[in-house]
């Protein structure tokens, strides 16, 4: 089998590849493990630059590297499949680089999100800001902001490097900019919603859905698919189909995430139990429960939501309300409907059998996973 050319893996010839990546067969370019290796290579390259400034920056890179070792590489998979679907199932040069950029962007979003949510754990390891919080919470938060900013700039650099000289570079960049702006807008909607709730305002279910679509759903599946498809020169109808499939699948993914936060096993999810409840987040699960709760049930929710000291007893009480109001059942039904929508969209796309099968499996896994 032919070896992977450096311009086909990671981001370009300007960065030497490890022997492990260089020796992979060409079809392995569709494997997200390649992207994991590329992410680690980029972090290692940046470590050299930062430690040349001061060796004390090493622990910052260590914290980022530990976070990068975990994760499902879901967004990377969708980039690779989006590109392959535009090329009759073949790997597309530059796709691994764009997938690497998306993974770095995702890491940045996680680091910043954890700062805003005061989260203690992510992917089974302490969050970046907690690692540096021993001096003070403010110091830890500031380091978290800087680490997230570094990851954002690295992601932009890798994207530019991966598409340099390609005819689709400008079109890929346009999708990237839309993804980046919409994610940050969604984060703002989440913060504004929490502030409104703290001031006693009600939040409509439709507003919650809109927030989760822009904060998470679109950049989990839709944008990665469109990035890969645009790189591969996909026709407009395929990109539109990717968008429809991606939004439905991404929303199902986020709703499952919300359910797992309350009902999942922290040993599997890698996150602290009921973190969203402690932060007082108005997920769709909570919004539906509040909409349908009795006065007594509403009191339980209002008393426990946003309580940083929420214990096992309080979590159990909230779970009981989420079940008794039918909120969990409604969310599960919505997840099922979204997966059905995604499959209908997928059925209408002209794709090779391997790409179609992989997308179908990923939609199913996103909706029904346990971690």
Image (tube, helix red, strand yellow):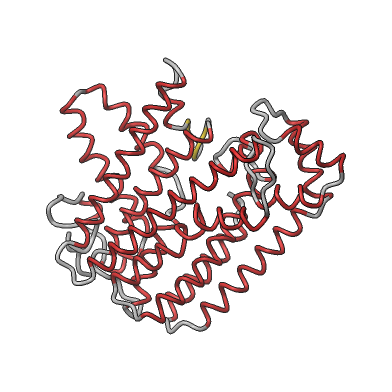
Which residue is depicted at the point 46% across and 52% down? Answer: 72
Q: Foreground: 123 or 329?
A: 329
Q: Position of residue 332 (x, y in %)?
A: 70, 60
Q: Position of residue 311 (x, y in %)?
A: 71, 28
Q: Looking at the image, is 249 positioned above or below residue 235? A: above
Residue 273 visible in image: no
Q: Looking at the image, is 97 positioned above or below residue 318? A: below
Left-right relation of 256 to 114: right
Q: Looking at the image, is 311 positioned above or below residue 174? A: above
Q: Quadrant of residue 8?
A: bottom left
Locate the N terminus and report the quarter of the image it occupies: bottom left
Q: Looking at the image, is 355 positioned above or below residue 363? A: below
Which residue is depicted at the point 15% across and 50% down? Answer: 15
Q: How many marks?
A: 0
Q: Position of residue 282 (x, y in %)?
A: 65, 45
Residue 72 visible in image: yes
Q: Residue furthest left?
A: 14
Q: Foreground: 256 or 297?
A: 297
Q: Quadrant of residue 11?
A: bottom left
Q: Foreground: 233 or 199?
A: 199
Which residue is depicted at the point 44% across and 58% down? Answer: 219
Which residue is depicted at the point 47% across and 21% down? Answer: 137
Left-right relation of 311 to 168: right
Left-right relation of 221 to 54: right
């Amino acid at each position: 089998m032919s070896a992977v050319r450096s311009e086909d893996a990671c981001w370009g010839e300007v960065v030497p590849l490890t022997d492990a990546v260089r020796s992979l067969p060409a079809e392995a370019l569709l494997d997200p493990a390649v992207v994991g290796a590329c992410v680690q290579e980029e972090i290692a390259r940046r470590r050299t630059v930062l430690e040349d400034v001061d060796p004390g920056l090493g622990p910052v890179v260590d914290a980022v590297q530990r976070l990068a070792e975990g994760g499902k590489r879901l967004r990377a998979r969708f980039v690779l499949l989006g590109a392959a679907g535009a090329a009759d199932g073949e790997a597309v040069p530059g796709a691994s680089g764009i997938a690497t950029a998306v993974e770095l962007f995702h890491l940045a979003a996680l680091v910043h999100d954890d700062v805003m949510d005061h989260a203690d754990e992510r992917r089974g390891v302490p969050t970046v800001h907690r690692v540096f919080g021993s001096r003070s919470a403010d110091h830890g938060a500031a380091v978290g902001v800087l680490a997230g900013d570094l990851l954002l700039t690295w992601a932009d650099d890798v994207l530019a490097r991966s598409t340099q000289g390609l005819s689709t570079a400008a079109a890929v960049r346009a999708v990237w900019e839309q993804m980046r702006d919409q994610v940050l807008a969604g984060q703002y909607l989440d913060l504004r919603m929490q502030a409104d709730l703290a001031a006693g305002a009600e939040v409509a279910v439709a507003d919650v859905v809109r927030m989760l679509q822009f904060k998470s759903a679109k950049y989990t599946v839709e944008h990665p698919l469109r990035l890969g498809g645009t790189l591969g020169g996909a026709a407009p109808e395929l990109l539109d189909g990717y968008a429809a499939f991606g939004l439905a699948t991404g929303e199902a993914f986020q709703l499952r995430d919300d359910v797992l936060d309350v009902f999942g096993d922290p040993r599997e999810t890698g996150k602290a139990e009921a973190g969203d409840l402690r932060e007082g987040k108005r997920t769709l699960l909570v919004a539906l429960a509040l909409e349908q709760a009795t006065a007594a049930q509403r009191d339980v929710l209002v008393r426990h939501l946003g309580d940083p000291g929420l214990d096992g007893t309080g979590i159990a009480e909230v779970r009981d309300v989420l079940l008794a109001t039918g909120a969990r059942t409604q969310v599960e039904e919505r997840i099922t409907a979204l997966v059905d929508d995604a499959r209908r969209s997928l059925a209408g796309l002209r794709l090779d059998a391997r790409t179609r099968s992989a997308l179908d499996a990923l939609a199913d896994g996103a909706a029904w996973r346990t971690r």
